[in-house]
Image (spheres, rainbow, N blue to C red):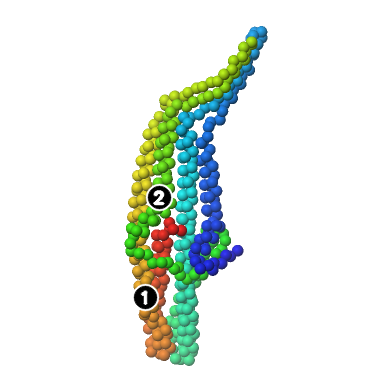
Amino acid sequence: MIVPVYAQDNVASVLNQIESNSTTLSAIRQQIEAQKIENRTDIFLNDPEVEFSYLWGKPSEIGTQRELSVTQSFDFPTAYAHRSKISKMRNNNLELQYKSERLNILLNAKQICINIAYNNALNKEYEARLENAQQIAKSYQSRFDAGDASILEKNKALINLTTVENEKKLIDIERKTLLSELKALNGGIEITFDDTEILNAPISSDFNSWYADAEIKSPTLQYLSQQIDIDKQQVKLNTALSLPKFTAGYASEKTFGEDFKGITVGISIPLWENKNKVKLAKAQVKSTELLLEDSKLQFYTHLQQLHKTTFGLQESAQTYRSSILNNNNEELLKKALDAGQISLIEYLLESEYYYDVKNKMLEAERDFNLSLTELRAVEL
């Protein structure tokens, strides 16, 4: 099954399909739902305990003894509230984990689309170059047969044709490879993507005003910030678990001629079981806070450098495109060759220079879009 992409924003359409069809995201979602259930398993009271005993007396004249007890143990009451809050917060963090995985997959998909668009543009360019090379080779073969061109000129024209044909084949191979990668991300469903350029609004040189919004949207930083709150809540839980535990229940005892019934209560003094757990939880809070600060620093530094690189690539791409538009000698060179004003060697050398600049323009635009996509990944 091939899913064509014809929407105005074709990249967005591709990303929407991948988000819906990705088997990786489906597996991650299923795993997260299972983890959510697990997070809700230890927030309730312990199971009640029931004991019954039936004892035969000896000698038999003293009869039998029957005992029944039903008890329920529970932690200090505030512990259950803390457990419930931690469970909800952990489940919220699981959603941030999913969001982070989603961004990674969509970032990869968009970068593949950019590379496909680059190969599409390059393929279109080489189609025109191939047609031109075929015309030149045919022309010089005819001229050679008529004795109007040397064998060196004929061979040069044929070598040029072979070179263009092979370069175009390599472009086709790369394009098919990229489409296969896109298919794998899309759950095995093929996607056609024929765009030759990715349009993006230019970025400003002002980094700091943009960064503030990017920091807020980062799922990784959100996760760590939420993890600090979870760790702080864990401190409160461990403090509550360091308080006495209680048991309450009902007991009855029947012996020959006697019947006892009543309630039972008990208390457990936590002297050793939870030793150092509060201290451990506080240390974890400090560790996560330091990790968040380090992650913010690394995030800021990485994006600052990436922003600088992206802005530089943007200027480079704009310069190349302006130069191509203002200094296009391709048609003039072809006319000069056909008129015999320049030799085939001169034509090929001049054309190669022009083609090299055009290839560099396409590469610069591709690299700019790849860098910009990574810079704006939190917006996907």
Q: Are marks 2 and 1 in contact (CB under 8 Å)?
A: no
Going 36% across and 42% down the picture, which residue do you hit? 287
Expressed as whole percent of the image width and height from the top left, the position of residue 44 reads: 53, 34
Callout 2 amino acid: Leu
Question: What residue would you read off at disc 1?
Answer: 322
Near-viewer residue (226 or 170): 226
What amino acid is found at the position of numbered circle 1 in the picture? Ser
One can see residue 174 in this view: no
Residue at image location 51% in from the left, 25% down from the top: 247
Residue marked by disc 2 = 221
- Relative to residue 332, is residue 360 depicted above or below? above
234 or 166, nearer to the observer: 234
Front: mark 2 or 1: 2
Instruction: Compare marks 2 and 1 and give the one earlier in the sequence.
Output: 2
Residue 46 image position (x, y, % from top left): 53, 31
Q: Which residue appears at 36% of the width and 76% of the height?
A: 323
| Mark seen at residue 117 | none
Label 1's element? helix
Q: Residue at x 37, y 73 (%)?
A: 320
Vertical relation: 43 (above or below) 359: above
In the image, farthest residue toward the right = 60
Q: Say few, some or many: other residues with alpha carbon within 10 Å of mark 2 (under 14 / 14 to 19 / 20 or more).
A: some
Whether residue 286 appears in this view of the structure is yes
Q: Does dot 2 land on a helix, a strand or a loop?
A: helix
User: Which of 79 and 219 lies nearest the eye of the viewer?
Assistant: 79
Local crowd at mark 1 within 10 Å, few (<14), some, or many (≥20)?
A: few
**Location of residue 115 in the rendering, given as x and y in whole percent from the top left corner:** 46, 66
x and y percentages locating residue 264 in the rendered image? 53, 21
Q: CA distance from mark 2 to mark 1?
A: 40 Å
